[in-house]
Every structure is written in C-alpha cells, then in structure tokens.
Amino acid sequence: MSFSIHQARRSLCTAINSKLLLQTPLANNITTAALAPSLLFSTTRTFSAAKPKTAKKAAAADTPPTLSYQARKDLAKQKRRDAYARKQARLDSLKTRRDDKTDRGILKRTFMEWYSKEIEYHAILERKARQEGKPWKIRVAALVERLPVVTPDMEEWEREFVDLQEYLMTFGKVYPPETGLMPEEKEEDHVVMSDEEMLALLPFTPAPRETEADATGDVKTRDRRLKTFLYLAIRTKNEGILSDSPRWTLPSAIANIQADQKDSDDAFETLLQTAQRAVSTSIGSDLTLWCPSNAPVAINYRVYNKNLPEEFRGKYYGEKIFFYRVQWDSGDVDEGSLAKGGVEDYAWLTKEEMLERVEGERGVHQAKFFKYLL
C-alpha cells in the first residue's frame, strides 16, 4: 500500500496530535525526505488577540455576581434606558447645534404655518365663489411708506463690537521689544475720543434724533420717528363696512378692469395706476410717489357680508385686494382734499401703531396680516 506525500503529512499530523507517533506504522516507501523538518508541525498552541467584548457581554461582566437574576435584569434595563436617553438628547442638540439658545428658523416656521392656512382659506373662498357663479371685485390698496431718515440706534452687542474695533485700531499689535518692529509710542496715538467730543469738533450743530413731534405725540407729520419706517393710514368708511364709525386702513380704490367695464375708456387702467389714483383721491395730488415695482406685494380676500347694501355688493361675491408698496418722495397731504375723498382723518404711523389700531378694530387675524405686510 503506497501513500502520497499529502496523505503522509495528514497521517503524521494525526499521529503527533494523538501522541501515537511511536505506534503509527509508516509505509515502507516513505523516505527520510518525507520526514523532513518541513513536514513536522509544532505541538505548541498559539492564540490570536482576544476579541473585544460586545456591549452585552461587557455589561454582564460589569454586573456584580452577587446580585440576583432579577436585580441583574433590572440593572441591564436601566442601562439601556440611560443609553436611549443620551441618544435622544444628542439628536435634539443636533437639530440646532446651539445648546441653551433660541431655535433657529422659528420665525420662518411661524410665518409658514400662518401662510399655509391663508392659502387653504383662499382656495376655499375661490371654490365657493365658483359654485355660486359670482365674480370678484378688484380693489387696490397703496402702502405709502416714508423711509428712515437717520440710522437706528445700535444694539448693545453692536456697540461693544465697534468699541473693540476702535481699541484694536488705536493700539494695534504688540511685538517684543527685541524685534524692533514696535514704533515709538506717542501719547496722542492712544487718545480715544468719545462721541460727544467728536460732535463738539463739528463746524455745525447736528439736528436732534428725537423731534418735537415725538415729544408732543403729533402723528400728522412725517417729522417723527426718524429711525424707522412710517406708513400713511387714513380713517374712512369708503370700504363698505357695517359699522357707522370709520376705521383705520390704507388708501384704496376699485380697479376699472371689471367685466362690465370692458367697453369703457377706463378699462385699460393698470393696477399700479389704480394705486396711484387711490392716493390722489384720498389725500390729494400733492404727494410725489416713487413706485419700485409694477407687481403687488400681497393679496387678501374679503367676502361681502349679506347685510351690506345691495348697491355696494352688486353681483360680486367679494373683493380681491392687491397691495402695492410705494415710497414717499416729496410733497405733503392736502387736508383740503380729505373730505372730497371721504377721509375723516389721516396719520403717519409706525408698524406697531398701525397694528394696534387694526387689532382694536378688526381683530387679531387682520392684525397678523398687516404684521407680515408692513
């Protein structure tokens, strides 16, 4: 019986591992070369690096062996709860990366929540108008604004940043004396003048940032609240309201582009021209306005109340109000033209003052619309 070299190696390994090498008969044809050292295997066992313990085994190893089975089970459950709590806390912190600070994007989300509801409500009104077969009347409102005259007051952090910049510009970088890069210091190089000292050096007296109208509370002049925007508001009943008392609103007019006016000469009036006409008919034509765009900035819907006079409602379901932003350039309100336009009062109001009047007369919903409009 003859063996191959491969079979001889297998037999030899088996004999060594079972300590029966002396009892194993070798075939006669296995030569000494077949028993060379290269064929022999060391009986010393070698071990690889120990594998890392899994989380479960590590937790079990950390558990004191004296605890009962139920106690070890409760301890493992508590460790899982703690790990889950740490994971959730980390995920919450990753949303903003700003621990203990205001959530980023909260103003945008608040606006989108309100805006999405408004869009859904407008779609419902459009569907109801189609079901009743009634068109919409087009009204254009002019948002006349006066731009800020002076720069607003700095916030506290802005003031600190400016002070830091002035300090660095005054003293600059400091190098070791042995480098020879530092120029000779002079006392006048480190003088920091205050705002009052610089104003005293001017060849003229600056106008005050707070005017007399701010002190007296006069709202019929543009010479007030110079640091912010002012908006022209009128008090009228021209919009067809049920209440006998007028309300504060923006100058507006019905556009001459209705379906029953196609044959009229005024049928080609654009919405921007309607906005300009709304201002001139309400407060006179002395104001010179600059219109930055031909597109409206917002649109709102108004459904006619059935208690409104029939001559006002007509066959229309309601009004679509387009708001145009125009800026005051020159001129003033012609108080003699107010009565002709059905205007009882007017005022140049800030955003906060306008919202206060609208909320008191129309409610929170309309006040929020004006909040995002202004």
Image (cartoon, helix red, strand yellow):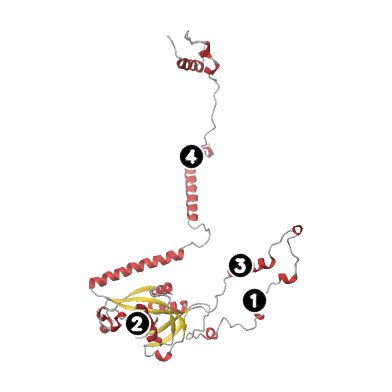
Q: Secondary structure at mark 3?
A: helix
Using the numbered discs, state the Cα–Cα distance from disc 2 to disc 4 in whole angstroms: 76 Å
- For the residue marked with disc 1, what is the amino acid? Asp
- For the residue marked with disc 2, what is the amino acid? Ala
Using the numbered discs, state the Cα–Cα distance from disc 3 to disc 4 in whole angstroms: 53 Å
Q: Earlier in the sequence, mark 2 or mark 3?
A: 3
Find residue 311 and name its label.
none
Q: Residues within 10 Å of mark 3 (few under 14, many from 20)?
A: few
Q: Residues within 10 Å of mark 1 (few under 14, many from 20)?
A: few
Q: Which residue is mark 3?
A: 161
Where residue 52 sits: x, y (%)?
52, 36
Name the residue at the bottom extreme: 336
**Foreground: disc 4 or disc 1:** 1
Using the numbered discs, state the Cα–Cα distance from disc 2 to disc 3 in whole angstroms: 48 Å
67, above or below 101, in the image: above
Residue 56 part of the magenta segment: yes
Please say if the residues under marks 4 and 1 sit with CB atoms less than 8 Å apart.
no
127, above or below 90, in the image: below
Q: Nearer the viewer, residue 217 or 221?
A: 221
> Residue 259 falls in which quadrant of the image?
bottom left
Using the numbered discs, state the Cα–Cα distance from disc 2 to disc 1 in whole angstroms: 49 Å
Q: Which residue is mark 1?
A: 195
Q: Secondary structure at mark 4?
A: helix
- For the residue marked with disc 4, what is the amino acid? Lys
Q: Which residue is mark 4?
A: 56
